[in-house]
Image: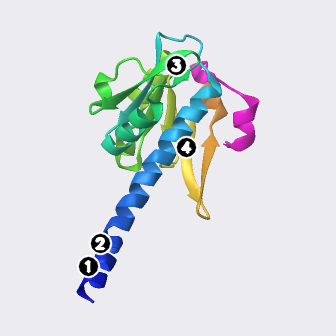
């Protein structure tokens, strides 16, 4: 009886952790997949994803991108602790907890440096954000802000547009 109680308790404790990890793995896979359907005006020597203050997503992206190429380029993941010190990235992801770091300064930098900004927290203006992840009826969805991709000179394929909610 005691053994069943301990196993049940462990399942209760570990289930939320497993869900959290699977969400990060899902985001990692979706981010890498989205990158395949985006064209940047200037490709560097590698494709870089910057993640603002989300170490779990950094780990999931590192695992998901290991040995993979996008647009014939190696993929690197950059942990971003200070948004003002962002090096050259192609994608910059802001989680809900990092959304407060998204400022007009960042959106201006994103436009100038041709950065695809992805968030998971909708705000009133969504200035500079190209893609926003959200959940609807238990399914992950994403919004595409075409005016912001156009400002950055980033082209999004028709296949990606068909999957997105266009804003």
Image-quadrant location for residue 38: top right
Q: Residue tagged by mark 2?
A: 10
Q: Residue tagged by mark 3?
A: 114
Whether label 3 touches label 2, CB < 8 Å: no
Give the class, few, some or many, for how many residues have Cα within 10 Å of label 3's Cα (few <14, many ≥20).
many
Residue 88 vs residue 9: left or right?
right
Callout 2: SS: helix
Residue at screen point 53% across, 42% down: 125
Q: Residue tagged by mark 1?
A: 6
Residue at screen point 48% across, 28% down: 91
Residue 84 vs residue 141: left or right?
left
| Residue 102 vs residue 86, the one in the foreground | 86
Q: CA distance from mark 3 to mark 4?
A: 17 Å
Residue 2 vertical placement versus 83 (above, below)? below
Whether label 3 touches label 4, CB < 8 Å: no
Return the disc, 3 or 2, that comes first in the chain's sequence: 2
Whether label 1 touches label 2, CB < 8 Å: yes
Q: Position of residue 73 (x, y in %)?
A: 52, 15
Q: Position of residue 74 (x, y in %)?
A: 47, 18
Q: Quadrant of the N terminus?
A: bottom left
Q: CA distance from mark 1 to mark 2?
A: 6 Å
Callout 3: SS: loop
Residue 64 vertical placement versus 120 (above, below)? above
Q: CA distance from mark 3 to mark 1?
A: 52 Å
From where the camera sits, is residue 30 visible? yes
Q: Which residues are magenta?
A: 150-167
Q: Residue 132 got which mark?
A: 4
| Residue 158 vs residue 148, the one in the foreground | 158
Return the disc, 3 or 1, that comes first in the chain's sequence: 1
Q: CA distance from mark 4 to mark 2?
A: 34 Å
Residue 118 vertical placement versus 151 (above, below)? below
Return the disc, 3 or 4, that comes first in the chain's sequence: 3
């Amino acid at each position: 009886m005691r053994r069943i109680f301990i196993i049940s308790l462990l399942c209760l404790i570990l289930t939320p952790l497993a869900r959290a990890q699977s969400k990060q793995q899902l985001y990692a896979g979706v981010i890498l997949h989205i990158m395949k359907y985006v064209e940047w005006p200037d490709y560097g020597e590698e494709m870089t994803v910057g993640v603002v203050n989300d170490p779990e997503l950094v780990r999931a992206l590192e695992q998901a991108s290991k040995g993979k190429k996008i647009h014939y380029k190696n993929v690197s993941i950059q942990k971003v602790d200070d948004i003002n010190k962002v090096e050259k990235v192609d994608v910059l992801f802001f989680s809900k907890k990092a959304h407060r770091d998204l400022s007009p300064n960042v959106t201006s930098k994103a436009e100038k440096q041709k950065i695809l900004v992805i968030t998971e927290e909708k705000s009133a203006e969504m200035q500079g954000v190209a893609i926003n992840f959200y959940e609807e009826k238990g399914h992950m969805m994403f919004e595409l802000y075409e005016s912001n991709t156009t400002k950055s000179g980033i082209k999004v394929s028709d296949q990606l547009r068909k999957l997105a909610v266009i804003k």
